[in-house]
Image: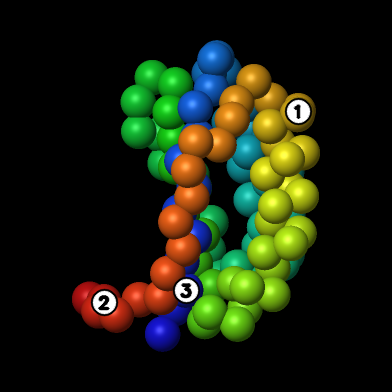
Amino acid sequence: MSFYSVSHWETTDWTDEMEALARDKYVPLVKGLGAESVNMVRTGDRTFIVVTKYADQAAGEAAQARIDEIRTEAAEELPMKMSSVERGSTFASG
């Protein structure tokens, strides 16, 4: 079954430039590590989640060390911080 990572983020500012950087830099970086999809979802004025799908748990775990580095880089480059992350395998889908 598919494996997902869902990270929760807070930012002190929200700009079109930040959205462009996320779309043009960070999504391709994560996909380059084997993610099948990366969805950044705005959940509030200054909050968002990143939902990353991998083919299976092995693929997700193989990418994890580099994902941690990318998260650190993003938090240094942009005015944001990760507040939590969850990971798990799909048990039902439709």
On screen, residue 80 versus residue 84, left or right, reads right
38 or 84, nearer to the observer:
84
Residue placed at 55% from the left, 14% from the top?
Answer: 13
Amino acid type for the residue under numbered disc 2: Ser
- Label 1 to label 2, Cα distance in Å? 35 Å
**Is 72 displayed left or right of 43 in the figure?**
right
Q: Amino acid at mark 3?
A: Phe
Report how many numbered discs are placed on residues in the image: 3
Q: Secondary structure at mark 2?
A: loop
Taking the view exactly as shown, the residue that stands out farthest to the top is 13
Label 3, secondary structure: give it: strand
Residue 77 screen position, x and y as percent? 76, 28
Query: Which one is earlier in the sequence, the residue at label 2 or at label 3?
Result: 3
Q: Is residue 57 above or below residue 87?
A: below
Amino acid found under the numbered disc labelled 1: Glu
Residue position marked by numbered label 1 in the rendering: 77
Are there few (<14), some (14-19), or many (20+) residues within 10 Å of tag 3?
many
Residue occupying image coordinates x 68% and y 32%: 75
Residue 7 on image: x %, y %:
49, 47
Q: Which residue is mark 3?
A: 3
Q: Is residue 24 visible?
A: no
Q: Nearer the viewer, mark 2 or mark 3?
A: 3
Q: Which residue is mark 2?
A: 93
Identify the residue at image location x=47%, y=73%.
3
